[in-house]
Image: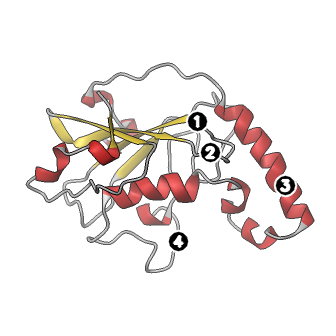
Amino acid sequence: MFRRLADYRALTSRSRGLNVVSAAAADGIFVRSFESDMDKMRVLIVGASGTPYEDVLFEFDIALPSDYPTTPPQVYFYSMTDGLGRLNPNLYEDGRVCLSLLNTWMGDSVEVWTPKSTVLQLLVSLQSLVLVKYPYYNEAGFERHRGTSEGFANALAYNERAFLLSMRVRRPRSSSPELLCPPCD
């Protein structure tokens, strides 16, 4: 069963000190872990209102490495586009997630993973920094187009494509922890 992140308590007692939960966690994030393997979890993030992803479910698998929290979790995104292209500059069809917090993209020292970073921080970042109103500007170098008529036209076209791609129906995933995060094994 998936639980709202705000209600999710099972991981707080982990011996490795996994502090995932906060009472003030964002709405629209649901987490499922497995008693047989607490280092893996399935996450559903509901696209926020006012974005091209509104009410769309985004599915991620997260695997905690043996040296967590020194190194960031491995994250796998289940793409729904069936080879038609990315629906977000940070989410790749092959499952990669590009985010400075995951150390998969260059970022300022305050944006990269540190041993003080948490899974909660990661999940909220995915929801609030990736699944945004105008994802076009998340593409490397496109931020400089913000505030221009050309940039806005490109952002609207990107949103239309993202909306159409995100509406594709996906088949349910297995809930077996052995099948989670294929490239994370």
Q: In which quarter of the image is the C terminus?
A: top left
Amino acid, disc 2 = Ser
Amino acid, disc 3 = Asn
First of labels 3, 2 by sequence position: 2
Q: Which mark is residue 49?
A: 2
Would you place residue 124 above or below residue 164 in this image? below
First of labels 3, 4 by sequence position: 4
First of labels 1, 2 by sequence position: 2
Badge 2: how crowded within 10 Å, few (<14), some, or many (20+)? few
User: In screen coordinates, is 58 left or right of 166?
Assistant: left
Amino acid, disc 4 = Met
Task: Provide the secondary structure element on which disc 3 rests.
Answer: helix
First of labels 3, 1 by sequence position: 1
| Residue 25, x across and y down, in percent | 36, 54
User: CA gap, disc 3 to disc 4?
Assistant: 24 Å
Q: Please report contact status of discs 1 and 2: CB closer than 8 Å, yes or no.
A: yes
Q: Nearer the observer, disc 2 or disc 4?
A: 2
Badge 1: how crowded within 10 Å, few (<14), some, or many (20+)? some
User: CA gap, disc 1 to disc 4?
Assistant: 30 Å
Give the labeled residue for mark 4: 106
Residue at 48 percent across and 61 percent down: it is: 104
Give the labeled residue for mark 1: 55
User: CA gap, disc 1 to disc 2?
Assistant: 7 Å
Task: Provide the secondary structure element on which disc 4 rests.
Answer: loop
Residue at 91 percent across and 62 percent down: it is: 150
Q: Residue 154 carries which label?
A: 3
User: CA gap, disc 2 to disc 4?
Assistant: 29 Å
| Residue 182, x across and y down, in percent | 37, 35
Q: Which mark is residue 126?
A: none
Q: In which quarter of the image is the N terminus?
A: top left
Amino acid, disc 1 = Asp
